[in-house]
Image (spheres, rainbow, N blue to C red):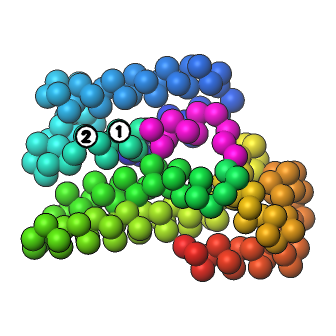
Amino acid sequence: CRLADDIVDRNRGKDTALLQAELDAYRAGVAEAIAGRPEGPVFRELWRCVQEFGVPSDVLEELLNGVARDVQPQRYATWAELSLYCEGVAASVGAMCTYIFGVAGDEAVRERALRYARTLGVAMQVTNILRDVGEDALIGRCYLPDDVLSAFGLSAERVLHDPTVKDDPQWIAMMRHEVARA
């Protein structure tokens, strides 16, 4: 999970086609590992986890699809759009953890644990977004949804280009709102 995310994060400024090719190669390595042909230590451990713990390939694919959204800068118009991104990049990780950590009980217990794990993943991703607003702005990214910003009299342009936004009472109110959501 970390390596997939690092592909898009560490290669800032690279041509997006090159980033996409790198991510596609990583995706192919994941597919090969799932098929029982892992190459390299990371993919061998992935194959072992899939075999030993039954981590389903659909959550791995969900993660890779979520990470792929970061190849090009994204804007999120609504909380619902951002939530879908968070599902891909973080709720998927929560789901994987339920397989690796194990869930004792019947299918109803497993489904409840899976919902909680996915919810926790989204909450952690929102927390990460709030923590990294300034760092993300420096590289032209604003994950805060336009509808949330505008409800507080703010805009993505201001987040991206106005370092004094952090002192605005509306910013502080918006951040409190988003922290409470997380």
Evaluate whether residue 180 shows in this view.
yes
Task: State how far apart marks 2 and 1 are (Cα).
Answer: 6 Å
- Left or right of 168 in this view: 125: left
User: Circle 2 sits on which residue?
Assistant: 57
First to last magenta residue range: 65-75
Q: Given the image, on which type of amino acid does mark 1 rest?
A: Glu
**Image point 30% across, 26% down: which residue?**
29
Which residue is more in the foreground, 169 or 61? 61
- Residue at left 13%, top 52%? 53
For the residues bearing labels 2 and 1, Cβ distance under 8 angstroms: yes
The residue beneath circle 1 is 61
Give the amino acid type for the residue marked by disc 2 in the picture. Answer: Ser
Q: Residue at x 20, y 57 (%)?
A: 99
Q: Main secondary structure of the magenta part?
A: loop
Numbered disc 1: secondary structure: helix
Q: Quadrant of residue 140?
A: top right
Image position, residue 179 (x, y; %):
62, 76
